[in-house]
């Protein structure tokens, strides 16, 4: 059974139709590349899955059960983690504090609650080790490379056992060497049984790591194919509209 | 100067002791120590315990507000209205203590005709909190930049203070009221104890609570904080409430010390307060700074003023020196940051 099942998802912003009836499914341990030109509706679709937008029409099923998210926090609680394109990191805080931001570990002293920094440093160190990242929990994020920053944002998704991890353009702003690191992080997520949706403009990334690719154009899904059954040329044609659909 | 991140950075570099880095990072505490040594050598009266406690007492009023201001500046905000708010809240407290304006100049026989001190105290703090809540609301809901909101507050609260007091002072309080500004516990003046207690509490809140972490996060990257589900608007609003609270508290201590409240009190106080916070290493861009730094900054200004007065340096020259130190402190921070990047 698919872990995520979208049927007939529509989203209107006033007169603008960002999504006009998209069906999409995702299995456990699968990496889906979601591609499309600017304005094709990728971000809108991701925001709907992550709970920041409510769809105007359509249904979303998680593990077979119908879900409606009104806030990002609800999707997170249901096991859907989004890694934002800008990574949503606070440069002035340590790696560990960024990982735990919004979900801090606290301990009680009498009626008061205090941050348990030691516990957070320890847990963050474990997470970075699992990701085989050299990021150190106490380092400030502002001194980090793009790859390390990605590792911090991805470590966040593993605080809980998420069912689905959404990555919005994770390789858009980092160096070639660091792209390799990020793709490795994505493989590791898949190997641990997570379902991943990778939103990307970059053909080599999608063909390097995804099992399946879906293409959006003007709010419609125009293709949904196994990677082995398609080619970068065909996908490029689908994105631009040179190939109508496949 | 960024005391908080010291341990982190040392752990990161993993190298030996870096003297230049240490000097640049701890310039405010080191400069304070140097000032104390210099004044102690040049002017024997400086180190007298009575003088040192006096410095502390003078510092405690602006220092308390600087603690609240640290929260605001950590979120990349600013509050220019604190001097005016001190005048307004001080007058409200005095008014309540006196039970009205009729006995505004009454001393001795009539001083206890009004309300209990605790009511005056609560009234001053309530008005401070309300003013802070109002300004915080304008910043977070009307989306007016904090500089503009509190510049408006600077004018409006001063006007309100003048209107409320009909221009004149309210003087002569009961001994119980005056104790808060003039009393001592052991040898230590009451305002100093309150200032230091406030600093300890604020330090614990900022360093060890979820709320404190959120203040840093909002100042570091408000959008990221929002994306992580933090209550950014509530946190931003709350820092103006906190600084309003510290204004109410400080004005109560000030009026008790002077046994008088007036509408022209606290003029230019905002500059001293902001200078203390910035000299203490808090970044005006938000996200970086400590309460320890602010206490050092406030002490530095107080010690400098006191030492220069003892040495008969004119107050005009004092102003020039404090201005230069303010700029030098920020320049040193920039230097330390640039050095770290390279």
Image (cartoon, rainbow, N blue to C red):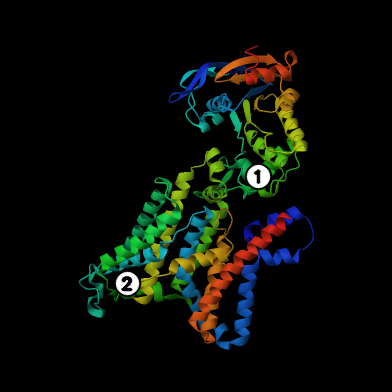
Residue furthest out toward the left: B102
Q: Which mark is residue B262?
A: 2
Q: Are marks 1 and 2 in contact (CB under 8 Å)?
A: no
Looking at the image, can residue A161 be seen?
A: no
- Mark 2 lies on a secondary structure that is loop
User: Is A138 placed above or below B199 here?
Assistant: above
Residue B185 visible in image: yes
Q: What is the quadrant of residue B264 in the picture?
A: bottom left
Please identify the residue farthest to the right as the structure is shown: B16
Q: Is residue A2 left or right of residue B170?
A: right
Quarter placement of the C terminus of chain B: bottom right
Query: Image point 75% across, 31% down: which residue?
Result: A184
A132 is higher (above) or lower (below) than B100:
above
Q: Which residue is mark 1?
A: A96
Q: Residue A33 placed where, x, y %? A: 67, 23
The subunit letter for the residue under badge 1 reads A
Q: Is residue B57 left or right of residue B224?
A: left
Decide which of A119, B227 is in the foreground and name it: B227
* Number of on-image labels: 2
Q: Quadrant of the N terminus of chain B?
A: bottom right
User: B203 or B277: which is nearer to us?
Assistant: B277
Q: Is residue B110 left or right of residue B42?
A: left
Query: Residue B203: where, in percent of width, then height?
Result: 54, 58
Residue at 23% across, 67% down = B99
């Amino acid at each position: 059974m698919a872990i995520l099942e979208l049927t007939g998802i529509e989203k209107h912003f006033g007169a603008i139709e960002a999504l006009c009836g998209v069906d999409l499914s995702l299995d456990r341990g699968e990496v889906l590349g979601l591609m499309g030109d600017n304005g094709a509706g990728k971000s809108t679709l991701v925001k709907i899955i992550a709970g920041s937008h409510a769809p105007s029409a359509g249904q979303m099923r998680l593990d077979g059960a119908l879900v409606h998210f009104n806030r990002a926090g609800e999707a997170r609680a249901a096991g859907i983690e989004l890694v934002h394109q800008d990574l949503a990191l606070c440069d002035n805080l340590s790696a560990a504090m960024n990982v735990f931001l919004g979900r801090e570990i606290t301990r009680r002293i009498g009626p008061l609650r205090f941050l348990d920094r030691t516990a957070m440093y320890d847990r963050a160190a474990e997470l970075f080790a699992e990701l085989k990242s050299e990021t150190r929990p106490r380092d400030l994020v502002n001194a980090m490379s793009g790859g390390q920053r990605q590792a911090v944002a991805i470590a966040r998704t593993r605080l809980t056992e998420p069912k689905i991890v959404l990555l919005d353009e994770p390789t858009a702003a980092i160096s070639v060497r660091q792209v390799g690191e990020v793709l490795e992080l994505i493989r590791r997520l898949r190997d641990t049984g997570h379902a991943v949706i990778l939103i990307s403009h970059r053909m080599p990334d999608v063909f390097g790591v995804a099992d399946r690719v879906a293409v959006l154009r003007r709010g419609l899904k125009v293709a949904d194919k196994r990677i082995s059954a398609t080619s970068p040329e065909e996908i490029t044609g689908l994105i631009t509209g040179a190939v109508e659909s496949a | 100067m960024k005391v908080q991140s010291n341990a982190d950075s040392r752990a990161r570099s993993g190298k030996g002791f870096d003297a230049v880095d240490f000097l640049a990072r701890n310039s405010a505490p080191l400069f304070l120590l140097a000032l104390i040594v210099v004044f102690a050598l040049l002017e024997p009266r400086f180190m007298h315990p009575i003088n040192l406690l006096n410095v502390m007492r003078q510092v405690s009023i602006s220092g308390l507000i600087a603690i609240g201001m640290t929260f605001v500046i950590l979120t990349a905000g600013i509050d220019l209205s604190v001097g005016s708010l001190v005048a307004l809240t001080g007058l409200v407290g005095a008014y309540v203590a006196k039970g009205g304006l009729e006995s505004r100049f009454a001393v001795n026989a009539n001083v206890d005709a009004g309300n209990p001190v605790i009511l005056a105290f609560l009234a001053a703090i309530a008005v401070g909190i309300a003013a802070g809540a109002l300004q915080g609301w304008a910043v977070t809901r009307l989306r007016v930049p904090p500089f503009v909101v509190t510049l408006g507050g600077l004018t409006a609260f001063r006007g309100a203070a003048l209107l409320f007091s009909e221009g004149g002072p309210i003087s002569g309080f009961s001994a119980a009221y005056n104790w808060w500004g003039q009393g001592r516990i052991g040898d230590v003046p009451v305002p100093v104890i309150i200032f230091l207690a406030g600093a300890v509490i604020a330090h614990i809140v900022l360093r060890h609570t979820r709320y404190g972490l959120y203040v840093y996060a909002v100042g570091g990257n408000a959008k990221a904080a929002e994306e992580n589900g933090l209550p950014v608007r509530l946190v931003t609003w709350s820092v103006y409430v906190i600084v309003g609270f510290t204004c109410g508290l400080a004005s109560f201590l000030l009026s008790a010390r002077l046994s008088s409240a007036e509408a022209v009190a606290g003029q230019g106080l905002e500059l001293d307060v902001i200078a203390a916070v910035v000299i203490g290493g808090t970044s005006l861009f938000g996200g970086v700074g400590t309460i320890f730094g602010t206490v050092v900054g406030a002490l530095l200004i107080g010690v400098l003023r006191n030492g220069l007065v003892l040495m008969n340096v004119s107050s005009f020259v004092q102003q020039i020196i404090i201005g230069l130190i303010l700029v030098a402190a920020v320049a040193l921070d920039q230097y330390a940051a640039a050095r770290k990047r390279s």
